[in-house]
Image (cartoon, helix red, strand yellow):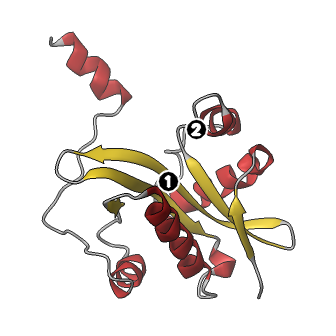
Amino acid sequence: MSYNIRLAEKKDMTAVLNLINELAVYEKEPDAVEVTVKDLEIDGFGAHPKFTCFVAETEANVVGIALVYMRFSTWKGAVLHLEDLIVSEKMRGTGLGTALLNTVVKYGDQLGVKRISWEVLDWNAPAINFYEKKGANVMRDWDVVHLNEKAIKGYLKTI
């Protein structure tokens, strides 16, 4: 099956959100997505975009995305963070994930980043195998730390 990978446009954000929701279901967090199409449009296409998104499409249907943003490492310098690489279930195994990851790595190289980083759930063996085959180092000795919105408010009450 043929597909085209391109930079996302504002009009793609409904399809992007649909894929985000599909991922949330796959990751057993179907009610966790709070972002809206409007949020994606404002944050991705406003005066100061907070992310860059690549979409993969077949016959004008978005079937995959890679959403990235810049970070800074005190050890390495500029880092590109891959927030999500999502391939619709019907397109898995077609090479689309590789094509999207290739696009992200080329983009990071063009930006001159020192590292591209992302997280993967420890139970997602297919994704871990995919990333390790591509040469990524899955760092199992690091834990991801988050303060969610409620925790931020609670923290602020203590200072």
At x 63%, y 60%, the residue is: 54
Which corner quadrant holds the N terminus?
bottom right
Residue 46 sits above or below residue 109 on the image: above
Residue type beneath disc 2:
Val
Residue 27 seen anywhere in this rendered image of the structure: no
Give percent across and percent down for residue 20. Answer: 59, 54
Where's residue 52, x and y in %? 58, 49
Q: Residue at x 56, y 66 (%)?
A: 86
Label 2 neighbourhood size at 10 Å, few (<14), some (14-19), many (20+)?
few
Marks 1,2: beta carbons within 8 A: no
Taking the spot 25% from the left edge, 72% from the top edge, the residue there is 138
Please indicate whether residue 122 sits to the left or right of residue 59 in the image: left
Residue 144, percent from left and from top: 24, 52
Residue at image position (60%, 86%) is 95
- The secondary structure type at the circle numbered 2 is loop
**Residue 68: which numbered mark, if any?**
1
Q: Nearer the viewer, residue 144 or 26?
A: 144
**Amino acid type shown at disc 1:** Val
**In the displayed structure, does residue 98 sit left or right of residue 144?**
right
Disc number at residue 35?
2
- Residue 129: image tag: none
The image quarter in which residue 25 lies: bottom right
In the picture, which quadrant includes the C terminus? Answer: top left
Residue 13 in sight from this viewpoint: yes
Please say if 51 is above or below 155: below
| Dot 1 alpha-carbon crowd within 10 angstroms: few under 14, some 14 to 19, many 20 or more | many
Q: Residue 82's quadrant in the figure?
A: bottom left
Foreground tag (1 vs 2): 1
| Residue 79 in the figure: left or right of residue 159 | right
Dot 1: element: strand
Tell me: residue 142, above or below residue 103.
above
- In the depicted structure, whether residue 68 falls above or below residue 155: below
